[in-house]
Amino acid sequence: MEIVFLGTGTIYPDPGRRAPGLCLLTRGLKLVFDTGPGSWFRLTEAGVDFRKIDAIFYSHLHIDHVMDFPAYLFLTHNPEYGREKTLDVFAPHAFEHFYETLKGVFGGWLEPSGAEVRLHPLTRRLQSFDYKELTIASAHVRHSESSLAYRVDYGGKSFVYGGDLEYCDEIVELAEGCDLLVIESAFPEKEPKDGHLIPSQAGKIARRAGAGRLVLTHFYPQCKGEDMVGPARREFKGEVIQARDLMRLKV
């Protein structure tokens, strides 16, 4: 499995950091997790054909994580960017209403040309399911009412994507023993915010979960010039990585 970071910042304009999103490449599959504004530009910069993605997994419905979803469906109406296979979308249950509302505004432009969107609504409870050859689990985490984190297991390796969250036992349970844990560290150590993590909290989650490596991402402007890795390393003795756009990591 290989992770490509599409956006490691926020919706605030920053040429170096787009809004949240990443792509998991494995067994010929292309899975995208969250699609903040600019995701398809970054995927193209990474050399990945956005027309060929298999599925999108959404952590929650905040604007900075979902806004490139309608853009993607609109793109499929250009003959050069059409789809020929179903797009699977895994998301909190509220995503169904979100999609129907978008179609009410934009009409047929949100019905992909040549394929269909197949929604897989997920509840707050911890659940596990198979997708292709992968085992995927989702669990509610503390951020918004329906926020989810995801775990992907394949071939003895495991990857966890936390989305937005604050410190909670649910993410520790989901990430237990994972090889690569990708979670936000949205604000610096000196500026904690409800609903988000600071570096030491991210490190504590990785330590309690027994993760192999920890990757910090989703940095707000307040993080510029701050030490985001040091406080996490004081809690977690494994490798701590500060993500950057277009960075690639093997799981």
Image (tube, helix red, strand yellow):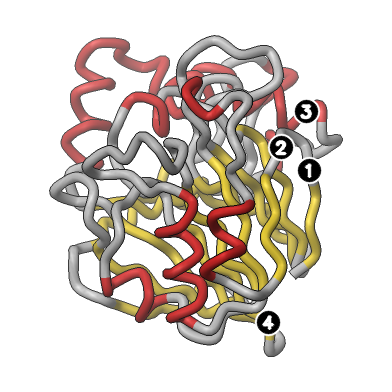
Question: How far is disc 4 from disc 3 in space, using C-alphas?
Answer: 26 Å
Q: What's the amino acid at mark 2?
A: Arg
Quadrant of image for the N terminus: bottom right
User: Which marked residue is nearer to the observer: mark 4 or mark 1?
Assistant: 1
Give the structural element (helix, strand or loop) at label 3.
helix
Residue ID for mark 3: 44
Give the structural element (helix, strand or loop) at label 4.
strand
Residue ID for mark 2: 244
Quadrant of image for the C terminus: bottom right
User: Which marked residue is nearer to the observer: mark 4 or mark 3?
Assistant: 4
Specify the label residue 157 is tagged with: 4
**What residue appears at the point 68 percent right and 13 percent down from the top-left corner?**
15
Specify the label residue 110 is tagged with: none
Question: How far is disc 1 from disc 3 in space, using C-alphas?
Answer: 14 Å
Question: How far is disc 4 from disc 1 in space, using C-alphas?
Answer: 19 Å
Give the structural element (helix, strand or loop) at label 2.
loop
Q: Residues within 10 Å of mark 4 (few under 14, many from 20)?
A: few
Q: What's the amino acid at mark 1?
A: Met
Question: How far is disc 4 from disc 2 in space, using C-alphas?
Answer: 23 Å
Give the structural element (helix, strand or loop) at label 1.
loop
Question: How far is disc 2 from disc 1 in space, using C-alphas?
Answer: 6 Å
Can see residue 113? no
Q: Residues within 10 Å of mark 2 (few under 14, many from 20)?
A: many
**Is residue 2 shown above or below 218?**
below
* N-terminal label among 4 and 3: 3
Specify the label residue 247 is tagged with: 1
* N-terminal label among 3 and 2: 3
**Is residue 91 shown above or below 226?**
below
Q: Position of residue 243 (x, y in %)?
A: 68, 44
